[in-house]
Image: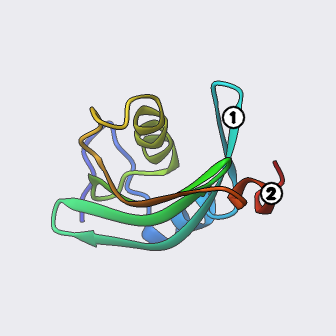
């Protein structure tokens, strides 16, 4: 799969390693990222993951095939800031409660 002239293709395995177990910080809150799967399908990249903080969110990101960790982090930050407006993130569930303690909150 060819990447555009200003874009570098990131293999799914490399994206997984760049995100899994890392933390995303936004507005004074910390979210631990756990990646379950990364799959390229045609022009799309699908990433199944969870964010654990004060609440736990199960999400699927819909990005462009080959997108890397910075694009995924941008989509996640956008969704956390405005969940109803994000078009690249599909929420499959959220749980409040003890998830923050498990993520070192």
Tag of residue 40: none
Task: Name the element at disc 2.
Answer: helix
Quadrant of residue 95 within the rendered picture:
bottom right
Where is 51 relative to 39, above or below? above
| Residue 58 appears in the picture as rendered | no
Please identify, in this view, whether the residue under mark 2 or under mark 1 is nearer the observer: 2
The residue lying furthest to the right in this view is 104
Local packing at callout 2 (Cα closer than 10 Å; few below 14, some 14-19, many 20+) is few
Which residue sits at x=45%, y=36%?
Answer: 74
| Residue placed most toward the observer, 4 or 96 | 96
Task: Tell me: 83 left or right of 55.
Answer: left
Instruction: Give whichever of discs 2 and 1 has the lower sequence position.
Output: 1
Residue 1, horizontal then vertical, whole percent: 24, 65
Residue tagged 1: 29
Which residue sits at x=69%, y=34%?
Answer: 29
Where is 100 relative to 11, above or below? above
| Residue placed most toward the observer, 72 or 3 | 72
Which residue sits at x=72%, y=60%?
Answer: 98
Quadrant of residue 90 within the rendered picture:
bottom left
Residue tagged 2: 101
Task: Tell me: 94 left or right of 8.
Answer: right
Cα gap from disc 2 to disc 1, whole angstroms = 13 Å
Task: Name the element at disc 1.
Answer: strand
The residue lying furthest to the top in this view is 27
| Residue placed most toward the observer, 48 or 16 | 48
| Residue 99 appears in the picture as rendered | yes
């Amino acid at each position: 799969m060819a990447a555009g002239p200003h874009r570098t293709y990131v293999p799914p395995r490399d994206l997984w390693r760049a995100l899994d177990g890392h933390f995303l910080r936004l507005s004074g809150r910390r979210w631990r990222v756990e990646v379950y799967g990364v799959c390229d399908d045609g022009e799309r990249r699908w990433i199944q993951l969870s964010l654990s903080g004060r609440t736990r969110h199960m999400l699927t990101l819909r990005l462009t095939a080959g997108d890397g960790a910075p694009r995924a982090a941008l989509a996640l930050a956008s969704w956390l800031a405005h969940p109803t407006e994000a078009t690249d993130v599909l929420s499959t569930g959220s749980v409040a409660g003890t998830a923050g303690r498990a993520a070192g909150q």
